[in-house]
Image: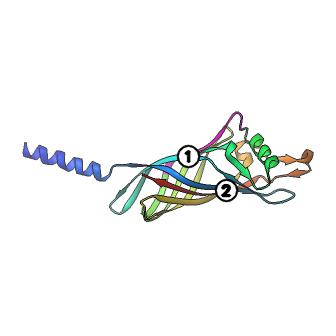
Amino acid sequence: MKKLIALIVLVSVFVMANAQEEYKLTGSTVKISGTSTLHNWMADVTKVSGKLAMSENGGGVNLSSVNVEMEVYSIKSDKGSTMETNIYNALKAKSYPKITFQLTKVNSISGTAADLTAVVSGNLTIAGTTKAVDLTVKGKQKSNGAIEFTGSKKLKMTTFNVKPPTFMFGAMKTGDEVTITFSAIFAK
C-alpha cells in the first residue's frame, strides 16, 4: 500500500510539473506591408484574439497549442478608407471575416520562456483558403510573467486565392507579396 501511495504521489508531481498552462493574448501589433505601382502601403490589424498552451520542463519549453484570430474589418490602412475597402473586398471579408492561425507542429524550440526561438508550422486561413505555413518566432518573458512573441512572414496573396487589389480601373496595382510583422503578448 505504501508503494502504491508513493507511486501516485510521484505520478502527480510529474503531471503537475509538466502541466500545460493556458495563456491568453493580451496585446498585439500586427502590420501588413506591401507595394503598389504608385507607392508602398501599410495596414494595421487592430482586433486580434488568441490563446496558447505551454509548459516549462527542465529549463526548456513545450508549446502544445496556439490559436490566433484577426478580424478583417479591423484592418486599417495608412492610405485611408479607399484602400481599406479594397483590402476588405480582396479578402472577401463579408464571407470570411476572420484570418486565423492554428499551430500544427513545433519543428524546433530552443531556450527557456525567458528567451526562446521556435520554428513552428501551422494552418493559416485567409479568405477561406487554408495553407500550411512555417514561422520562426522569438519569445521573451516580461517582468510580469507574460511572454511576448515576435516574428514576420512574407506571403503571396495569390497563394490564398486573393487577387491583389487594383485601383483606378486597373491603372494602379498592388504587388502580390506582402509582409506580415507581428508582436503578440500572452499572459496567464
Indicate left or right for 27 with 115 as reference: right
- Provide the residue span drawn in magenta: 93-105
Relative image position of residue 98 (x, y in whole percent): 64, 40
Dot label at residue 49: 1
Dot label at residue 170: none
**114 relative to 105, above or below:** below
Relative image position of residue 34 (x, y in whole percent): 75, 57
Indicate left or right for 132 with 44 as reference: left
- Amino acid carrying label 1: it is Ser
Tally of numbered discs: 2
- Residue bearing mark 2: 31
Residue for point 54% across, 54% down: 27
- The answer to whether residue 20 is seen in the rendering is yes
Relative image position of residue 88 (x, y in whole percent): 74, 42
Is disc 2 placed on a helix, strand or loop?
strand
Indicate left or right for 146 with 9 as reference: right
- Amino acid carrying label 2: it is Lys
Residue lying farthest to the left in this orientation: 1
How packed mark 1 is, by other alpha carbons closer than 10 Å (few <14, some 14-19, many 20 or more), is some
Q: Earlier in the sequence, mark 1 or mark 2?
A: 2
How packed mark 2 is, by other alpha carbons closer than 10 Å (few <14, some 14-19, many 20 or more), is many
Magenta-drawn stretch contains 117: no
Quadrant containing the N terminus in the rendered view: top left
Residue for point 87% across, 58% down: 38
Residue for point 60% across, 50% down: 133
Is disc 1 placed on a helix, strand or loop?
strand
- The answer to whether residue 103 is seen in the rendering is no
Residue for point 37% across, 49% down: 20
